[in-house]
Image (tube, coloured by chain):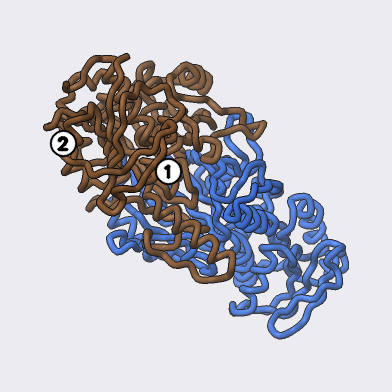
Chain colours: A brown, B blue
Amino acid sequence: MNECSIAIVGATGAVGQVFLNILEKRDFPLKSVRLCASERSVGKKLKLRGEEIEVELATPELLSEVDFAFIAASTAISRELAPLAAEYGAIAIDDSSAFRMQGNVPLVVPEVNGDDLDYHEGIVSIPNCTTTPLVMALKPLHEQNAVRRVIAATYQSVTGTGAAAAQELRDQSGDILAGKEANAEVYPHQIAFSVLPHVEPFWDNGYTNEEMKMQNETRKIMHAPDIRVSSTCVRVPVVVSHSEAVNVEFSDAISPGEVREILAGAPGIRVVDDPGSNVYPTPIEAEGQDDVFVGRIREDIALDNGIAMWLSCDNLRKGAALNSLQIAEEILERDLLLK
Amino acid sequence: MNECSIAIVGATGAVGQVFLNILEKRDFPLKSVRLCASERSVGKKLKLRGEEIEVELATPELLSEVDFAFIAASTAISRELAPLAAEYGAIAIDDSSAFRMQGNVPLVVPEVNGDDLDYHEGIVSIPNCTTTPLVMALKPLHEQNAVRRVIAATYQSVTGTGAAAAQELRDQSGDILAGKEANAEVYPHQIAFSVLPHVEPFWDNGYTNEEMKMQNETRKIMHAPDIRVSSTCVRVPVVVSHSEAVNVEFSDAISPGEVREILAGAPGIRVVDDPGSNVYPTPIEAEGQDDVFVGRIREDIALDNGIAMWLSCDNLRKGAALNSLQIAEEILERDLLLK
């Protein structure tokens, strides 16, 4: 595989840190790396593969010098920088929701729809961190037996919001344990020792943006415009990893044994399913791991042709940084660089 | 209403404490109260309505002297004491699962099926603390439009396990914040800053006992043997109150507005549903309250004739002690005492 030059935009954030952690160990074909962040972080030095790298601004000149710009900052920054990167010959691999539903922007999980990269025009989006593990588990099953509907309830960690939310969880937890009042700033209500059925703004239909993403992104990634996905997205006092209770109705009968067998052979999935021995996915176990952990696989007793399951996935790795890096690897493999 | 004499068995436990808290303020027609617990608590003194009451053993003699024995201890103690209470003329109102599915034992939420008390023979069971809020919300809707299937995912607090679990959550949280290892004894894995898809032992069908209760108890309480309920019960690091994401399929079309209106008029339900202003049920808000809080009411985009909603309920109050006391009030009202 050819080596590539990359820029990480948002290098000092929660996802940026995970990009660096993964690059330390993963056999990624790295020629050079530029680290970008906002003005107030410029000049700060971060370590990667034994080198100290100075944080810079993502200027057009810098973007013209790299093959990939991984953007993991705010949606506003994605809106500004992704088209700029493409204009200057760098493929933007974007973590935000800004371009995901745009027709000429592939929305990609390489294990699921790597082929969609063929039509990229300089911007590739990665899915929301709740959608990625869901489609990873659904796609191999869907190929055998078409998925008709999905009901999901999520248990999402605070790092999905960002580093400030993780600090708020720690601060509130400490204050409450010390008998003090909890102070809520990042979230509208206390998150420590609580759960909030509120991830992202509400639509007029009563769903949140996060919940609608789970249906819309799943349809696009799986090329299955008729799949119905109803979810309730809930923030829980967990630091890393999102978990999901998932109920799936298939077109035809399917047994838990078949599901287990298909998923055991699916790339990026680890079946962790021996409940009698207390073996099932947990966010703690999934943290720092590349795979999507799936367990609690059983016949759904309420849905026809139904299967219920439970999954946990590191939202910062496969949910963000790892998926972005795998997309770059897939683009190199397919020889789809802009320059 | 006639006054009654009661015994609280398990008075020193988490639910026992809540019995005492409620009796302090509630207009319960109390003639006298006996507090019972295990041998090691005998002689301990607890306060109620300005009096100090000494903890005793629940002997046949003691049971023969009261109208009601509220049993909130272990299933083993319920198995032993509930029939004994009935034999000695005290109606056992039992918190455990020991007798719930027995044909001659009413399983009662007074707002839902108070009429079932008419057939009691000395033992009345209260439902599981995840079933009670579910049937409270389902029953008034079911009367208008028959419920066909329910998919639920729970977010259950540690006091559902007991006081030791609440202490374990506090200890683990403090240890993790201090950078130490978390020590798991009550649960098979760390519960602080995690979630566990595991409440009660597993059945051969892959569901937990808690999950199967949600179907079986719902059917019995609602006199609706065909309702299908598939749930995933999950323990979360919350101290008090259980929450549930609930997706319901009805026989005919029903709008979120109709659901809101029906529930707003239903006894024991508080509709808390203005998501645009960050108003929805949370476990913190439900703690210490009598009502079941329901919100996030919306059309279910995956189920036909479906409604999605979210509820929170104090598992120690309506989920346990309050429901038990309301059953006693209903029995007095209906003049159904054994003596």
User: Which residue matches tag 1?
Assistant: A154
Q: Taking the image as drawn, is residue A227 in sight?
A: yes
Tell which circle, 2 or 1, labels the residue nearer the N-terminal end: 2
> In the image, what residue type sits under mark 2?
Glu
**Residue B318 in picture, x, y percent from top left:** 56, 63
Q: Is residue A261 above or below residue A123?
A: above
Q: What residue is rendered at 51% in x and 40% in y?
A: A283
User: Which quadrant of the structure image shows residue B253?
Assistant: top left
How far apart are labels 2 and 1 at the CA level?
Answer: 41 Å
Q: Is residue A323 left or right of residue B321?
A: left
Is A11 or B295 nearer to us in this picture?
A: A11
Q: Helix, strand, or loop for circle 1? A: strand
Residue at horizontal 26 percent and vertical 41 percent from the top: A96
Say whether residue B72 is left or right of residue A188: right
Provide the residue designation for mark 2. A61
The one nearer the camera, B3 or B49, is B49
- Please say whether residue B251 is visible from this viewpoint: no
Find numbered disc 2 in the image and state the secondary structure of the residue it sits on.
Answer: helix
Q: Which mark is residue A196?
A: none
* Mark 2 neighbour class, 10 Å CA radius: few under 14, some 14 to 19, many 20 or more: few
Q: Which residue shows up at 62% across the image and 58% down it? A: B170
Q: Give the left or right position of residue A145, taking residue B101 as reference.
A: left
Give percent across and percent down for residue B325.
63, 68
* Labels 2 and 1 positioned on one and the same chain: yes
Residue extending furthest toward the bottom: B50
> Vertical placement of B25 versus B216: above or below?
below
Task: Provide residue A27's location: percent of width, then percent of height.
Answer: 42, 21
Camera-nearest residue between B327 and B337: B327
Residue at image point 85% right, 68% down: B42
